[in-house]
Image: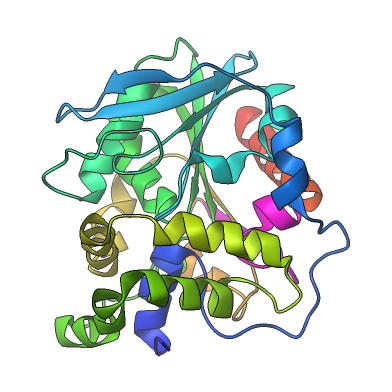
Amino acid sequence: MKLSGRVLQCAALAVLTACGAHHSTAPGPAAASAAASAPASAPLAATQFTASADGVRIAWHQYGQGETAVVLIHGWATDSSIWRAQLAMLAAHYSVVTLDLAGQGASGANRQAWTLPHFAQDVAAVAAKLPNAHIVLVGDGLGGPVALEAAPLIGARLLGIIGVETFRTIGLSPPLPSKLDHELRSFRADYPGTVRQFVSGTLFHAQADPALVHFVSDLMAQTPPDPALAVLTELNRLDYATIVPAVKVPIVVIDSDLGGAVDAARLQHAAARLRVVTLAGDDSFAMLDDAQRFNATLLQALAALAGQ
């Protein structure tokens, strides 16, 4: 399966968080087999549940203490487990919250409309349970636009948004419906097989740890196809011009250069308070396979937002 040009940017970057072919560049020096080491170092927390606006039960966890709460939002067809290598580090400085969006992880799947505003309500429902005076939303892939949609719901407590491998299509028009339909046919015909091929062939370097690639492939492929494809289509129809103007807080984008560096000038033209930090040589899951470098970059971005 090969998604082309513009639709690849939408179907992959807005959703799966990357585009283009593998780089020949090797991963950063801090890259390691997080698939094996991260779970052992992740702190434990009891699963809590709260109801989203449509009644779906949303599972969430809280770690650490701090005036500022960092809410971690996972990407398309994954769950909160992708943040496992960040929890201990962040919990030393902040109150850290992870959640499973509806249909993923331990959250309910009894949703009728799989839209960004509904996912934003999942985030807002969890944020409403937090006593923290300040909140920063960190969204990977799908979690980026979900954070933008959630910003007005959270209101004055929101200090900023950090997008990870997302927002690359800000300033571009959505693809034509016919083009999108053509590009998603393989997902509809064989969802698990297409997802596995896409993950291994597009989202990771050739040098990536096979165990990590397998973990991500399994996680994405086990998502039920109907809601997964509904969200995929929704994301590809997204026009950022309809949601970015309502966001009044700074935005930081942490992005790899897999498939080519992000067009920072285009993004900043559309969102004046946006800045881009590029992790050169990394792939789409630097939070797992280059955790040391990613964590240092994330801490810097959080400190800048919390200290503004």
What residue span does the magenta drawing correspond to? 274-290
Task: Residue 148: give x, y in percent of width and height.
Answer: 36, 46
Is residue 278 one of those drawn in magenta? yes
Task: Residue 55: give x, y in percent of width and height.
Answer: 16, 26
Report the side of 166 relative to 239 (left or right).
right
Identified at 25% across, 64% down, the residue is 229
Decide which of 1, 97 is in the foreground and name it. 1
Decide which of 229, 166 is in the foreground and name it. 229
Q: Quadrant of residue 67?
A: top right
Seen in the picture, residue 303 relative to 115 is either above or below; the reply is above
Q: Quadrant of the N terminus?
A: bottom left
Task: Residue 137: give x, y in percent of width and height.
Answer: 48, 36
Whether residue 67 is visible here, answered yes or no, is: yes
Whether residue 93 is visible here, answered yes or no, is: no
> How was this image coloured?
rainbow
Identified at 86% across, 56% down, the residue is 30
Identified at 62% across, 59% down, the residue is 285
Task: Residue 294: give x, y in percent of width and height.
Answer: 72, 50
Seen in the picture, residue 234 relative to 73 is either above or below; the reply is below
Seen in the picture, residue 132 relative to 59 is either above or below; the reply is above
Q: Quadrant of residue 2?
A: bottom left
Q: Quadrant of residue 179?
A: bottom left
User: Which residue occupies the extreme top position in the image?
Assistant: 131
Q: Quadrant of the C terminus?
A: top right
Is residue 144 one of those drawn in magenta? no
User: Which residue occupies the extreme left position in the image?
Assistant: 112
Decide which of 56, 122 is in the foreground and name it. 56
Seen in the picture, residue 254 relative to 138 is either above or below; the reply is below
Number of disc labels: 0
